[in-house]
Amino acid sequence: MMQEKSLATTLKALLYLAPALIILVVFNIYPIITSFLMSLYTDYDYYHDIVYRYGFDNFLFLLQDEDFHLALRNTFIFVLGVVPASITLSLFIALLLNTNIKLRGFFRTIYFIPFVTSVVAISIVWRWIFHTEYGLLNYFLSWFGVSPIKWLTDPKWAMPSLIILAIWKGLGYNIVIFLAGLQNIPEHYYLAARIDRASRWQRFWNITWPLLSPTTFFVSIISVIGSFKVFDEIYALFDGRPGPVRSALTVVYYIFEKFYREQEYAVASAAAYVLFLIVFILTLLQLYIGKKRVHY
Amino acid sequence: MQSMRMTKPFLATMLVFTLLLMTLSACGQNNPPTGSSSSSDQTKTTTETPAAEKPENESIVTTLDNPVEITFWHAMTGHHEETLQKIADDFMKQNDKIKVTLVSQGSYGDLQQKLTAAAKSKTLPTMSQAYEDWITEDIQNNLVVDLNPYLENPTIGWRQDELNDIVEVFRNANNWDGHYYGMPFNKSTRILFYNTDYLKEKNIDVPKTWDELREAAEKLTFEKGGKKVIGMGFENSVGTEFSMWVRQAGGKFIDEETGSVEFNSSEGQKALTFLRDMIEQGIARLAGEDGYMSNPFGRGDVAMYIGSSAGIPFVAQAAEGNIHWSGAVLPKDKVAATPFAGTSVTVYQSATPEQRLAAWEFIKFLINTDNTALWAKETGYLPVRYSALQSETWKKYVEENPVYGIGEQQFDAGFFDPRILGINAVQTALGKEIEAALLGEKSVDQALEDAAKAAQEAIDRAKERAR
Amino acid sequence: MRDALSKGTIYLLLSLGGILMLLPFAWMISTSLKPANQVMVMPPVWIPHPIQWSNYAEAMRVAPLGRYFINSVIVTVLSTAGELITTILAAYAFSRLQFYGRDILFSILLGTMMVPGEVLLIPNFVTLTKLGWIDRYEALIVPWLASVFAIFLLRQHFLSIPKELSYAAKVDGCSDGRFLWEIMVPLAKPAIVTIVLLKAIGSWNAFLWPLIVTNSKEMRTLPVGLTAFRTDVGTIYELLMAASTLVILPMIILFLILERYIVEGVSRAGIKG
């Protein structure tokens, strides 16, 4: 089956790829190219498709736009805050859910629920959890003598609040993917390990972790990409504003604002291009690390 | 193994993307602009005199021989949508040649996104609800129809007194250099909401000036049965309504003609200091995590607040069973100044001459005396005609629901925000800086200076872009 | 003894996390049964008094949920089925076939995931206009018939299926196609069910796209119907939550059906304490 590549195998592969490729080229790659081109429009008529001049002005604008710098900084903080914690937690929960406990199905359903709950319900409940006076979180913290924190109205706390919400919201998604990955590990490895009287930790470290690595690799790449594109959570948590004093402004929020509110189409495209390059380089890094760690 | 082999292609892909951009940009500069020269001339009209250079004197169709269909995009939902549909149905009964299709496009934000997509793909509807600053942008892009030829036409137009019957502040908001590109439809205003129980308890009259407002807020900040009541509340959008406070202090906001930012003045400082001091003293708060002020006000956490008249039903709902409340005209400082917000109706150039005529007929019907009164009564928006305000229906309604009568008492003090290009970026910057000052992150002077600088830059940039 | 203890810890941890997961859901259900003046009370009222079932009737009256429901089903079923087919074929090519430009093509596809959808909306709208698909099922379905995310996920699973299997199949004279559908696909069932689930939910809950590409009520889907309860100055939460509950019920049922497939192998894997 693993033939050397040749014209024949390439043609065959193209046949397999054609259905997906046609859709992706028309609805993903083509619009991506046009928007990247638009990042170079410096004098243009958007609605009549006329470009008078090309150049790098939009990138220069981003270079000196404080809002964009703020958005970049916030996005990095967000990614660093969310991705490692989210992956660790969801892997941990997936492992718990994969054990042979009673009510397993019941728990799985519960962890899946946030996934389908209306975003409005989620945002309102979290706004209540974070509420300074009436919120659940400050109530718990008060047991330990912590004075009320203004989670959503203090610019210093807006980003931590957003990170907490995002970790919570991403859990179910990652857990479902991890669970599927765990099912792919053939049982005979565990049987062998049991015969060897390996401890639970040894079994995890020597069997589960290496054999789950393709899934972990996948989840980490997807999470990094997804976190860089964070938008919905902000919209929900801060009620359509990027946090107090724009303290939760991220790059995609910036792009959204420029594109749909300020008619700065070219600047928005340039910002999208910058975001693309950043994520691209980081994915490269992940692939480099992954090559050493992932076992297929 | 797989991933290692992927590393190099990744670099290659990136290189390809970059090179692609470079080459395309390089050859682009040498190429003459594509597209016909006539359309590029048209799009080159400037902000200051959009109408003057436009060949908009072509004759219009004034009679309909054949049936015509028009679409009207809007952001009205629930009962508002039902009422709009009723008016459209009545219209179609009287005009059997015209079929009006109403399309709800979600929220205003969704509608704006949809209009952008439609304009880009040349599939705009015949007409739509639109804020005046959207229309400004649309005039710039040559997308909307000048309504003057219809308005001035002896057979289908309005007599001067019919035009003047439209409330002045709304009329002016839709007039760009003598040309009407829209007509007011659903308009709301800011009013002062207050808790009648608390005011009675503390024996306070409804504040009419800033000083009285501060005094009342101080007295109304108290403990009530273990609950901390705060005297005054502001919506989270207090930054974008800063123009109101500056004007009340006697200052200027932004000059619509020249686009020069004028709020960084002693009046601006007075206004921002006034707001900041109240919050710093703890006698005022922002809606913050509660989203809209109607919620904390309704549960009695806040004694007074300034908010939109369109929010009256939500205040009523939140207050039910908790508090008694009423409303009043806004307090003033040097002068009274009240912003009027809400959308107008505009017609797009993509419409055929017959559709434009049908749209004009529908606009006339939509805001005639009876219908604007009906609309206001059913939705809580303001009637847009003086004659409607005088009508028996409306007078009776206001008698029963006095808070709905507050809006019209402020018409003389009414103003609308400058309809300049870049106003959204201005509001964003302003909102950020004002909030920073109110939360104590920046000094008043610094915030105003930064806001003025950012606002001026945004306006200049938008002007530059439009040229 | 040690087992019982660790089991107890597992239950405790799962339950604590579970409560946090369930809170918004509980709030949604509870709000859907509240009279208006109990909705935005702080701290929240969890058990409405009185319980107001009429919210559901009112929500159904305000929005034509019936027609929207049919559209949602059509769009979800077709786009999920379509995506599954394109995904299986592409993932197979990327994981088991050798061809020129494979890795660079895969990188390009991964790259497309890094561009925020916000900038693609309008170009895609223009494309659909040119195709004449606006306000038709095609616009709701066709652009979503392939997903890089799903191809990537399935590729990872295919890669972790031992290569020895392919050699064995080859020896047996099994054709590529048969090998894919009869060996690879069944072996990757947990991943495939996951893809179906994630896609179905995504498609069912999609809001902005269906709103943008449709105009008539006859073509709109359930999430668009939810806009009926929102205005620019506030939201009618009790009706919105009643309608939302109706909207998500089918997805919960779908999960209950598919859940057993995702975790089919658990008893076999048998990681007992």
Image: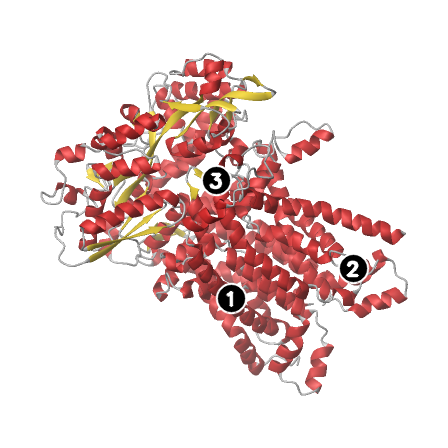
To which chain does the residue with label 1 belong?
C
C270 to the left or right of B368: right
Question: Contact (CB < 8 A) between labels 3 and 1?
Answer: no
Q: Which residue is mark 2?
A: A100
The label shown at residue A65 is 3
Query: Which residue sits at x=61%, y=31%?
Result: A134
Q: Amino acid at mark 1?
A: Val
Return the x and y of residue A215 as percentages of the image width and height.
68, 61
The answer to whether residue A30 shows anywhere in this view is: no
Q: Which residue is mark 1?
A: C77
The answer to whether residue B140 shows anywhere in this view is: yes
Residue A273 to residue B130: above or below: below
Query: Mark 2 or mark 3, which is nearer to you?
Result: 2
Question: Contact (CB < 8 A) between labels 2 and 3?
Answer: no
Quick one: A169 or B259, which is closer to the camera? A169
Return the x and y of residue B182 as percentages of the image width and height.
25, 41
Return the x and y of residue A62 as percentages of the image width and height.
47, 44
Tell me the element at label 3: loop
